[in-house]
């Protein structure tokens, strides 16, 4: 149940439309994303391309991109990018669900450690049924 950093840390590219009042959307997005919880790094590669590294248990690509759209930035909407985005959204949602994170939970790390604690053999378990524990 241990999650390695390679599985948890995602490295993605976010492409922006070239026609926009702000010619360097990637720089504006990088300044905003550096302050978000779960985002480890945000580096503009070009005025319209941004490289982002983030912890998938704290933030997802969908949440990051929705925040950028709310800022008024325009994501590239060509078919290749839309399909890639949908694939990333699906895989990250599945990854989080497999490790016990619900889609509405922002930070499920504590839940993961609790699940791991339940699976480890130790002497801190009460073997009585739930109704007996409440009775006594």
Image (tube, rainbow, N blue to C red):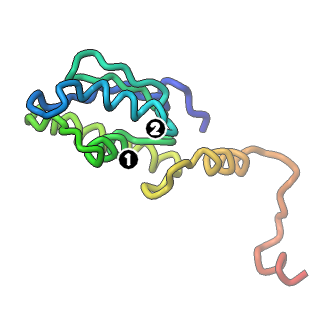
Extreme front residue here?
A: 21
Question: Dot 1, crowdedness within 10 Å: few (<14), some or many (≥20)?
Answer: some
Please report the residue visible at 41 percent of the width from the left and 28 percent of the height from the top. 10
The residue closer to the viewer here, 13 or 8, is: 13
Left or right of 24 in this view: 34: right
Say which element carries label 2.
Answer: loop
Q: What residue is disc 2 on? A: 56
Please report the residue visible at 36 percent of the width from the left and 41 percent of the height from the top. 64
* Residue 123 visible in the snapshot: yes
Q: What residue is disc 1 on? A: 93
Please report the residue visible at 83 percent of the width from the left and 46 percent of the height from the top. 122
**Vertical placement of residue 31 versus 131, above or below:** above
Distance CA(mark 2)–CA(mark 1): 9 Å
Q: Quadrant of residue 34?
A: top left
Coordinates of residue 38 in the picture (x, y in percent): 50, 37
Q: Quadrant of the C terminus?
A: bottom right
Say which element carries label 1.
Answer: helix
* Residue 91 visible in the snapshot: no
Q: Nearer the viewer, mark 2 or mark 1?
A: 2
Q: Are marks 2 and 1 in contact (CB under 8 Å)?
A: no
Left or right of 81 in this view: 27: right
How many numbered markers are drawn? 2
Q: Which mark is residue 26?
A: none
Coordinates of residue 61 in the picture (x, y in percent): 35, 39
């Amino acid at each position: 149940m241990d999650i390695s950093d390679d599985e948890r840390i995602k490295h993605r590219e976010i492409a922006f439309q070239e026609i926009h009042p702000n010619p360097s959307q990637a720089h504006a997005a990088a300044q905003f994303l550096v302050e978000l919880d779960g985002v480890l790094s945000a580096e503009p590669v070009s005025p319209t391309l941004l490289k982002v590294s983030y912890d998938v248990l704290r933030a997802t690509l969908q949440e990051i991109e929705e925040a950028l759209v709310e800022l008024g930035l325009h994501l590239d909407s060509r078919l290749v990018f839309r399909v890639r985005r949908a694939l990333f959204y699906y895989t990250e949602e599945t990854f989080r669900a497999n490790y016990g994170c619900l889609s509405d939970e922002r930070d499920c790390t504590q839940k993961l450690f609790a699940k791991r604690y339940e699976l480890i053999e130790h002497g801190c378990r009460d073997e009585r049924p739930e109704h007996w524990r409440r009775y006594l």
